[in-house]
Amino acid sequence: MKPRIAQGFTLIELMIVVAIIAILAAIALPAYQDYAIRARVIEGMSLATDAKQIVSTAALTQVELAVTATTFNEGQGGAGRTSKYIERIQIDDTSGEILVVFDRDNVGTIPNDAALILKPFLSADGGYVPLDVALANTYTGETGPVDWACASSANLLAVSRGMSVDVPSNPLPSRFAPGECR
C-alpha cells in the first residue's frame, strides 16, 4: 500500500474559507462606507476654517460682524464657500454662527441638505458667553479668546462644556460628524 500524497485543499475547506471571507466583507464594507463619509465631512469642515477665522478676528463689534458676514456670504454666487462636498457655508450676521451644508450627491448616504452648526463663544469668567451676547453690550465681564461649539444631530459635547448650540433644522447624523460635533 502506497501512502497518499496530499494534493491540495478539499472542497469543504475551500467553502469554509470563502464563507469566512464573505462574512468579513459583510462586516467591513459598511464600516468602510461610514469611514469614507466621515472623511469627506472632515475635508468639508476644513473649508469652514476660513469662516471661523474671519469671525474670530474681524467681528469686534456687531456692525463689523454684520459687514463681515455679508461680505463672506456673497462669495461664490451667494453660497459663501463651496466645494465638491459642501453646498454652502454661511455666517449668520447677528450671532456669528456658521452653517455648513453638505452636498449629498458627493458625500454619500446622508440626508439632503444635511448641516452642521458652528457657534462662537468667548471664554469668560470660567465659562463661555455667546459671541452675540458679548457684542450686544449686555455682557460686562472680562472675555477671552473665541472658542467654537458644534452641533450635528446631537450636541452632547458642546453642552457638556457649557456651550448651548441649537441642533440644525436638517442635521448631519452624528455618526458621520467630527467628534467635536457629536
Image: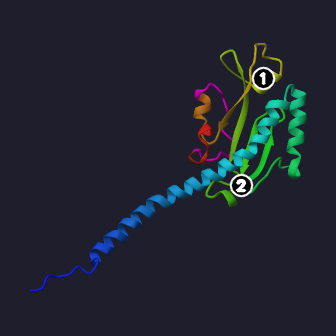
Query: Which residue does the image show at 50% across and 55% down from the upper left?
Result: 31
Farthest residue to the bottom: give it.
1
Q: Nearer the viewer, residue 99 or 76?
A: 76
Quadrant location of residue 58? top right
Secondary structure beneath disc 1? helix
Mark 1 vs mark 2: give the one in front: 2
Residue corresponding to mark 2? 85
Farthest residue to the top: give it.
141
The colouring scheme, among rainbow, by chain, secondary structure or one colour, is rainbow
Q: CA distance from mark 1 to mark 2?
A: 32 Å
Q: Amino acid at mark 1?
A: Val
Q: Which of marks 2 and 1 precedes in the sequence?
A: 2
Quadrant showing the N terminus? bottom left
Quadrant location of residue 14? bottom left
Quadrant location of residue 97? top right
Magenta segment: 160-174
Q: Nearer the viewer, residue 152 or 3?
A: 3
Queried whether the magenta region covers residue 170, the answer comes back as: yes
Q: Is residue 166 visible?
A: no
Query: For residue 133, which numbered disc appears in the image?
Result: 1
Q: Nearer the viewer, residue 59 or 115?
A: 59
Q: Amino acid at mark 2?
A: Tyr
Query: Which residue does the image show at 74% across and 31% down from the upper left?
Result: 120
Queried whether the magenta region covers residue 68, the answer comes back as: no
Locate residue 159 relative to residue 56 in the image: left or right: left
Coordinates of residue 106 in the picture (x, y in percent)? 69, 59
